[in-house]
Image: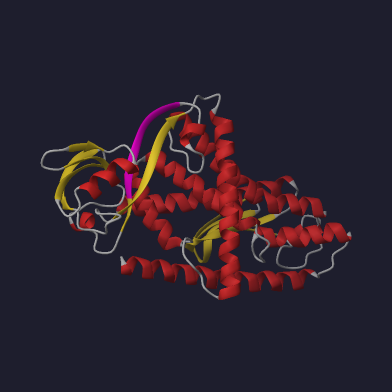
């Protein structure tokens, strides 16, 4: 529990700080005065001022963070105010946070593939390198799952499964599925790995006919990619994850606005915390991959043209660049972003409510 909480905070800090550092360094390079660099949203817990910038840690850290620049929320005649910078500089500053999340994900994937990591999107046979292992991991449980009742947990790696006269090494979905369906209704011994230790547990195969153990599974092919191949393999994987995420979010938002139904597959802070515990148990490389996925998701989310997000600000700047003048006054744009921020908070609340209901039902 404590390890999961600490890891969860570290992950959020890494994602938020890398994103905001992108805005921060781009603003500094552009000559814009940065008044505050904040982790989380008020009320304030701790702050220290260094030079012209106040560095702050706020209470609601799970909501993100921000970089407050002179002239961002109010009118200013200073040459160092954000609103007085050329459009191309403001565009670079808005894009910088997104780019930092993309770079962070790429670095994590390069490290992961160099040591040995499972591809997320790419078929394993398309990834050059040495296959180290193939793992079948418990990811979730069905209702009244016999495996859960017997004491197995999400993150356990199933190594083999034994009946009274047969032993099956588990290296693929088909190995496990064929065996459990063949011995449906009987008791078997599941040999699994948890936190580096090998354990055994007797389980009754009394779940559904399709999944007698009553579990949802992940298959991970651990592949070590040569260092000279890792950068482009990581870039290709990140691109494919990005396309998949973009399409998924597009469908999710379309359904939300057309049907009013939030749907499933999108998680908020509660879901991230839950999965953090799962990936902590799966090991450091799985955790690196999880952080990379979150970073890509954060980049994709922020590029959407929604007010209050970077994409919303980028949209206004692009309109200005095409029109060669500001069509929307600064204070009107700020009002639009404020309304967008309220919408995002409501959306986060809705998603979090769904996460809590899902946990209770489990």
Residue 338 shown left or right of residue 88 in the figure: left
Residue extent of the magenta highlight: 130-138
Q: Is residue 241 visible?
A: yes
Q: Residue at x 59, y 57 (%)?
A: 301
- The vertical placement of 351 against 194, above or below, is below
Residue 229 shown left or right of residue 99 in the figure: left
Q: Quarter of the image for the N terminus: give it.
A: bottom left
Q: Which residue, as the protein is rendered here, is positioned at the far front?
A: 182
- The vertical placement of 224 against 302, above or below, is above
Q: Is residue 37 visible?
A: no
Q: Look at the image and say whether residue 136 sits in the magenta stretch.
A: yes
Q: Residue at x 41, y 28 (%)?
A: 131
- Residue 35: quadrant of the picture: bottom right
Residue 195 shown left or right of residue 23 in the figure: left
Q: Position of residue 118 (x, y in %)?
A: 43, 38
Q: Which residue, as the protein is rendered here, is positioned at the far left?
A: 164
Q: Mostly what secondary structure, the magenta segment?
A: strand
- Residue 116: quadrant of the picture: top left
Viewer-nearest residue: 338 or 44: 338
Tell me how many marks there are.
0
Q: Residue at x 30, y 60 (%)?
A: 142
Q: Position of residue 133 (x, y in %)?
A: 35, 32
- Residue 78: quadrant of the picture: bottom right
Residue 325 shown left or right of residue 49 in the figure: right
């Amino acid at each position: 529990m404590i390890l999961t909480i600490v890891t969860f905070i570290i992950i959020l800090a890494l994602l938020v700080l890398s994103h905001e550092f992108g805005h921060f360094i781009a603003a500094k390079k552009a000559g814009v005065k940065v008044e505050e660099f904040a982790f989380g949203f008020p009320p304030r817990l701790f702050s220290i001022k260094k030079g012209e910038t106040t560095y702050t840690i706020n209470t609601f850290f799970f909501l993100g963070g921000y970089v407050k620049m002179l002239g961002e929320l109010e009118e200013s005649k200073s040459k160092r105010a954000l609103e007085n910078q050329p459009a191309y500089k403001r565009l670079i500053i808005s894009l910088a946070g997104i780019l930092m999340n993309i770079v962070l994900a790429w670095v994590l994937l390069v490290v992961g593939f160099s040591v040995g990591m499972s591809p997320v999107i790419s078929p394993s046979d398309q990834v050059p390198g040495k296959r180290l292992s193939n793992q079948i991991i418990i990811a979730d449980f069905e209702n009244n799952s016999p495996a859960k009742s017997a004491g197995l947990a999400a993150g356990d790696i199933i190594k083999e499964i034994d009946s009274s006269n047969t032993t099956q090494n588990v290296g693929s979905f088909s190995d496990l599925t064929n065996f459990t369906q063949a011995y449906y209704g009987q008791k078997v011994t599941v040999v699994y790995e948890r936190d580096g230790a090998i354990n055994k547990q007797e389980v009754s195969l009394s779940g559904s006919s399709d999944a007698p153990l009553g579990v949802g599974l992940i298959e991970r092919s651990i592949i070590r990619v040569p260092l000279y191949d890792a950068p482009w393999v990581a870039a290709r994987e990140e691109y494919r994850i990005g396309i998949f995420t973009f399409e998924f979010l597009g469908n999710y938002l379309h359904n939300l606005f057309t049907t009013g139904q939030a749907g499933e597959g999108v998680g908020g802070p509660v879901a991230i915390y839950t999965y953090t515990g799962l990936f902590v148990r799966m090991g450091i490389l799985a955790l690196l991959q999880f952080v990379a996925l979150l970073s890509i998701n954060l980049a994709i989310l922020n590029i959407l043209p929604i007010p209050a997000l970077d994409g919303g600000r980028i949209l206004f700047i692009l309109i200005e660049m095409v029109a060669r003048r500001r069509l929307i006054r600064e204070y009107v744009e700020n009002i639009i972003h404020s309304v967008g921020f309220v919408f995002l908070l409501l959306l986060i609340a809705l998603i979090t409510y769904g996460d809590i209901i899902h946990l209770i039902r489990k």
